[in-house]
Image (spheres, helix red, strand yellow):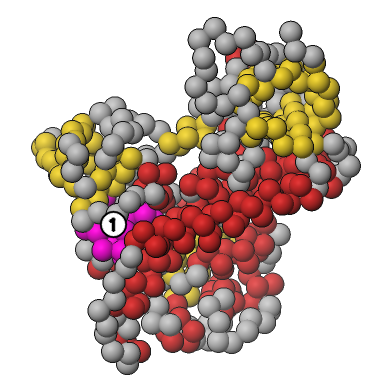
Amino acid sequence: MADVEQKDTVIVGGGPGGYVAAIRASELGQKVTLIEKGEPGLGGVCLNVGCVPSKALIAAGHRLQQAKDSSTYGISKTDASIDFAKTQDWKQHKVVDRMTRGVEMLLKKHKVEIIDGEAVMDNDSQLRVMKTGPKQFMDNDNGRVIKWNNLILATGSRPVEIRGFKFDGRVIDSTGGLNLPEIPKEFVVIGGGYIGTELAGAYADLGSHVTILEGTGSILNGFDKDMVKVVEKNLKKKGIDIVTNAMAKSSSQDDKSVTVNYEVDGKEQSLTADYCMVSVGRKPNTDNFGLEMTSVKLDDHGKVVVDKQGKTSVDHIYAIGDIVPGPALAHKAFFEGKTAAGAIAGKNTANDWVGVPAVCFADPELAEVGMNADQAKEKGIEVATAQFPFAGNARAVSLDEPEGFVRFIYTKDKKNVVGAQVVGPEASTLAGELSLIVNCGMNVEDVALTIHPHPTLNEPIQEAADVALGFPTHI
């Protein structure tokens, strides 16, 4: 039997939550060991096969469209073309690999021990690290046996696979969607959430004809309908077909195409495409590393039950990121990683945010933080709303992106901001200020009295506050 190794703080998973927790724990004086199985690698899904490479493809699509037609600015139209192999090479080596190397460098800088392998829980105080890859029959290697003073679980999530659409060949998940060898002429996306909508828009800009099959009555269900309408309008301008209330039933494929069978209002229909990407959600990785051998409690959705510091039902075991309740977002995992590391160090840290910003890099972008009006009313909070359109903003008009608006949801009595929304140019960037406003519980007057530079895209934040106070300037 292998010797038992005693470690201080052990972290399982090197994704957004795990590597940030490792850095913070080291900064707080802990000796840190990070176990990473190598797939998708340091930085996790977001950096390697998720939010970062998808933004690279979105950027490439925007550049191609601008090169094809900038006549609005008096620039003559040219016959722009794309070398997709070169695009993919840039995305992988100049974006993803560069950022991954940066994470590895930061971990080394903070003297974090990195163990390559797959962690398997033995009990509440011990795990083994096994070699990754195919296991040989009757393999005598029982792995490295490790005990810890504190353990942080950050094992992430994986795409949900639906019946009739096994991920194989021309039926792909979002990872496959980011790594296609060529731009498909016909591309079917099952699921109109933020992943499906973002990649649908990216491939439409790159030259694909895209069909989105969404099982509910609207794409981007988490956002208010008037925000989604702005996005739908632009998606249709790109030639994207959006089919709602569509239930995907089955698929068949050969070496050149895939046929997708689906049902709308009781009528069976089919589409043939080069590829079909399924993006209907993600499943927490709590079922694949022996967690059942511990006393760690899970909720009805298979997520780890934790307190405000990320502590599980087992003393000295913490959990963060996609495997705990709440939205599966990298920036939420960042925050939770810092909280758990601080809790281990005896700091008074807590995951006590008012709202976590949610962003979709559609065209235009959407972002929101805190409650919308309906959610506030459900909690018995009397609220009002105020919004300012980008059509009244000089910077947005000069960029030829005047669609959308900024909106505040605030209490009627004290005018405290409980939620904020934006759909329009650079909504993802504006989300940072909106998150500060909501999480600090600012009053709309506080916002209105904050001078914003002119001409910029963040002026509508101040303008929306002016609307709330009853003194609008530019509308």
Q: Nearer the viewer, residue 459 or 36?
A: 36
Q: In this view of the protein, which residue sits in the foreground, 23 or 410? A: 23
Q: Quadrant of the N terminus?
A: top right
Q: What residue does disc 1 label?
A: 183
Name which residue lies at 25% across and 54% down. 184
Q: Residue 422: x, y in percent?
A: 49, 65
Say if 402 sits above or below 211 in the image: below
The percent position of residue 83, horizontal first and vertical second, equals: 33, 65
Whether the magenta-drawn stretch holds residue 206 is answered as: yes
Q: Is residue 136 visible?
A: yes
Question: Residue sitting at 19 percent across and 47 percent down?
Answer: 273
- What amino acid type should be assigned to the residue bearing mark 1? Ile
Q: Position of residue 98 (x, y in %)?
A: 59, 57
Read off the magenta span. 196-212
Magenta stretch contains residue 276:
no
Instruction: State whether the magenta stretch is mostly helix, strand or loop.
Output: helix
Residue that appears at 77% across and 37% down: 113
User: Depth check: 309 or 93 in front?
Assistant: 93
Report the residue that reaches farthest toward the bottom: 74
Looking at the picture, tell me which residue is in the foreground, 394 or 378: 394
Q: Position of residue 155 (x, y in %)?
A: 60, 33
Mark 1: which secondary structure? loop
- Would residue 92 appear left or right of 400 to someone viewing this image? right
